[in-house]
Amino acid sequence: MDAPSDIIVPASAANMNIAPPADRHRVPDSDPSSGQTLAKGDVVKLHLGAHIDGYAAVSAETLVVGASAAEPVTGRKADVLQAAWNAAEVVQRLVKVGNKNWTVTDAVGKIAAAFDCKPVEGMLSCQQSQNVIDGKKRIILNPSEEQKKGFESVTFAENEVWGIDILVSSSEDGKARLEESRTSIYQKESTVTYQLKMKTSRAVFSEVQKKAGAFPFNIRSLEDEKRARLGLQEAVQHSLVKPYEVVFTPANTFVAAFHFTIALLPGGPAMITSPPVWYKPELVKSEKSLEDAEFKELLTKPLRENKKAKKKAQADAKAE
């Protein structure tokens, strides 16, 4: 691990790519503190993805270093973790054929509010397809009034695949801001063409195409990091490559993130990624809880409805 606070998994044979990570109160995409050592109590987000032939599965979860059943997470860290985890669990059951993206937006906002938290403003979840993880159909969290105006209402449809990104902040408004920080995560922009002038730029861009293709990559996965930073400057200037900017929430606030990939199959929704490994109720003890009856009932339901059992229950009811 080169950057303990972001937990980077290097790309291998173009099969594994980094998705936007976040650590402490820094929201996605960089490792300017690559020499930083993790300490007990640090909130750490692990976010990575893999693809086969351009079809990606992306996953993320949040943990707290050193937490245990004997010394569980408490206070605002617990609030933000439980808010994000509950939101992710509910959203898994709301992303289904026929539902709207705004249903998800509203649900995440209400669940975060139950823990006195806010979704991170403007964070997006996107439909995925081959070589695309940021499709045109999207979900937005905690949108500003300006963002609401131009945001399209969409309906989830059969055979779609979605990457769902749940980010919740313990701050009052969920706003994040840019600060002076150097990103290490970039992505090739497939819709832009430009003939690079510098020899170094062309060589680096060629390496990016071979190693990462259409997916985000960590600059350290390239052969020579210093050369890569130089070569990427021209590519970024002409929008051939886009940087994943580093944004921050205020000091003494925390961000929890959970990300999953879900396919809306004819037989019902199917999770492509595994559930969180670290999160367990005995590790996170918030004094707040989810009281909404509708959401609590939704959490008791399986992700995919057992149609045979439903038909049998209907038949038994008629027989009675």
Image (spheres, rainbow, N blue to C red):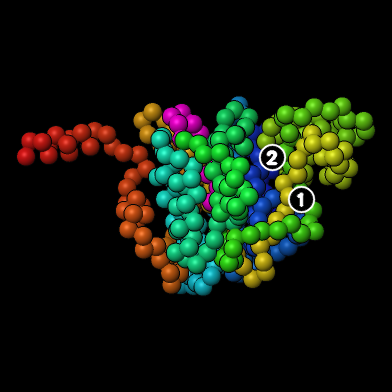
Q: Which residue is mark 1?
A: 183
What residue occupies the far left of the structure in this picture?
A: 320
- Of callouts 2 and 1, the N-terminal one: 1
What residue occupies the far right of the structure in this picture?
A: 198
Magenta-colored stretch includes residue 4: no
Count of all numbered marks drawn on residues in the image: 2
Q: Which residue is mark 2?
A: 216
Residue 239, picture quadrant? top right
Numbered disc 1: secondary structure: loop
The answer to whether one can see residue 270 in this image is yes
Question: Badge 2: few (under 14), some or many (20 or more) residues near its Cα, within 10 Å?
Answer: many
What x and y, as percent, mark residue 48?
61, 45
Residue 311, picture quadrant? top left
The answer to whether one can see residue 263 in this image is no
171 above or below 319?
below
Apparent side of residue 316 relative to residue 300 in the rendered image (left or right)? left
83 or 48: nearer the eye? 83
216 or 115: nearer the eye? 115
Apparent side of residue 35 relative to residue 62 in the rendered image (left or right)? right
45 above or below 40?
above
What residue is rendered at 37% in x and 43% in y?
Answer: 303
291 or 18: nearer the eye? 291
Q: Amino acid at mark 2?
A: Pro
Q: Which residues are magenta?
A: 156-166
What x and y, as percent, mark residue 218?
73, 44
What x and y, as percent, mark residue 256?
56, 58
